[in-house]
Image: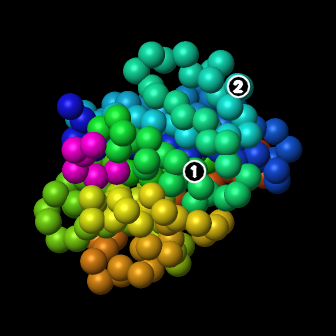
Amino acid sequence: MARYAIIILAGGSSSRLGKPKQLLEVNGTTLIEYIVNQAKALTNACTLVVTGAADLAIRSTLSLSDVRMYFNPDWELGMSESIKAGVREVLKLEPHINGCILMVCDQPYISTKLLEDMIALYESGSSEIVACTYGNTAGTPVLFGPAHFDELSNLRGHAGAKKIIAKYQTNTSYLPFPMGLIDIDTAEDYVTFISKNQ
């Protein structure tokens, strides 16, 4: 039985890139495979990939039997819809989890070690939310305890879960993740990332 759930939000259309960012090549694999592998290496956790615009392409790429996938038909309504769908699906599959971690698929410096550090901070008992910090913001990956599952299951709009983090700042622990500032949204982002990692 899983103690934690990792929800990978992979529903967007990558409109600024012009093609599915999830399938970009990163260190000999695709970005989505890299992110999934970091999640899968976490012990006592299950992984759910929430798809949308590139559902078929992602499914053909992730031929791993131990990764669950869920197609969100409302992906066009914003990230909140994918979060909501993912949390509801996870709670059907694993109703007794201690917490869930929301991840996006365009932060190429996410690591299993980062996820382990998030869980360790959460299990220290200081708060119900653990958010990563980079730049001047707090965001993904972010871990939510059961106290926030109802709110996550009823999110709306394009803001995602940031409004929940902002609402409960006094009940949030923050983990520095400077490389979280680097994501891949455009062709220029991708070229810059590849040039620095060859």
**Residue positioned 82% across, 53% down in the render:** 16
Q: Looking at the rendered structure, which numbered label has been put on residue 82?
A: 1
Q: Is residue 116 magenta?
A: no
Q: Looking at the rendered structure, which numbered label has been put on residue 56?
A: 2
121 sits left or right of 136 in the view: left
Residue 49 drawn at (x, y percent): 52, 36
Helix, strand or loop for disc 2: helix
90 relative to 16, above or below: above
Residue 33 drawn at (x, y percent): 55, 29
Residue found farthest to the right: 18
Q: Looking at the rendered structure, which numbered label has been put on residue 121?
A: none
Q: Residues within 10 Å of mark 1 (few under 14, many from 20)?
A: many
Majority secondary structure in the magenta region = loop
Helix, strand or loop for disc 1: helix
Residue 92 visible in image? yes
Q: Which residues are magenta?
A: 95-100
**Residue positioned 68% across, 49% down in the render:** 75
193 relative to 59, above or below: below
Q: Amino acid at mark 2?
A: Leu
Are dots 1 and 2 in contact, CB under 8 Å?
Answer: no
40 sits left or right of 72 in the view: left
Closer to the camera in the image, 34 or 166:
166
21 sits left or right of 187 in the view: left
Q: Quadrant of the C terminus?
A: top right
178 relative to 91, above or below: below
Which image quadrant is residue 80 in?
bottom right
Residue 188 visible in image? no
